[in-house]
Amino acid sequence: MSPNPTILLVTGAFHVDSAMDILGGRLQEAGYNTRSLGLKTVNNPGLTPNDDATLLEKDLLFPLIEEQGKDVVLYLHSYAGFPGSVAINGYSKQHRSATGKPGGIVGLIYQSAFIPKEGDTLIKMIGGSYAPWQSPDEKTGLIGVIDPKKVFYADVPDPLATVASNQVYNQSLVSFNTPSGPVYYTDKAYNGRRVYIHTELDQALPPFAQDQYVADSGVSWDVKKLKSSHSPFLSEPTTFSTLVEQVVKGFETLA
């Protein structure tokens, strides 16, 4: 295994890739290459988690792993658990090594993330109806956030919280209602390589829901708990980047 796997940072709903700039910068300072990805369902009505999974596979997983033979760690924030759980099919380091191929996913990090099962929808996993802070618009086919500073950045200091709030966009409405395809975090290749970062002060994805997703997944996770709201990569970037770095080093020590 490469001593420094590339860390892929995938944003959640309503966000673009620049949301990961601070975290990516801290990890690069620690010696890791990083790549960030914003998803296609942001500000694009009619697109689904399937489109996001295709984007993740086409733009990051295939070129880095299949073409360049790199080891990678996949970090999925919030909604990114939907497309990420699908896109990883066939990319585990263990499976690729067994067929004589270099590179692969050496570990999964889900942060305040959905852990879907095949057939699950986002709307189902948030309780069957839109959250009070969400504003769906059937005419535009988009859903917005009423108070992003409160929902996503409650513990992020200003002016950063205001800047981040101004970079929150609408999300495809249909992305909330499209069933997930087959999921692959359940693969035995990821046993001991699944980490869930649980944010205990989260106002977007309640802590009890995060606990339930882990319990319902049917597989084991190493759960790390933070006294943070939904965006620790902004509220406490030094602490959070150190945690991610420690998790990645833990993956590297595994056979």
Image: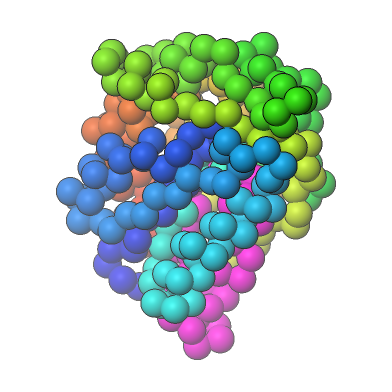
Per the rendered image, the range of residues in magenta is: 82-110
Q: Can residue 20 be seen in this view?
A: yes
- In the image, residue 51 lies at what x, y percent? 65, 53
Q: Can residue 111 be seen in this view?
A: no
Residue 209, magenta (yes or no): no
Left-right relation of 52 to 192: right
Residue at 78% across, 42% down:
178
Seen from the viewer's position, the closer of residues 16 and 253 is 16
When asked about the image quadrant of residue 113, the answer is top right
- In the image, residue 11 lies at what x, y percent? 48, 41
- In the image, residue 244 lies at what x, y percent? 35, 44
Residue at 52% across, 29% down:
169
Residue at 40% across, 22% down:
166
**Residue extending farthest left:** 29
148 relative to 180, above or below: above
Image quadrant in which the N terminus is located = bottom left
Residue at 34% across, 63% down:
5
Image quadrant in which the C terminus is located = bottom left
Q: How many labels does the image show?
A: 0
When asked about the image quadrant of residue 149, the answer is top left
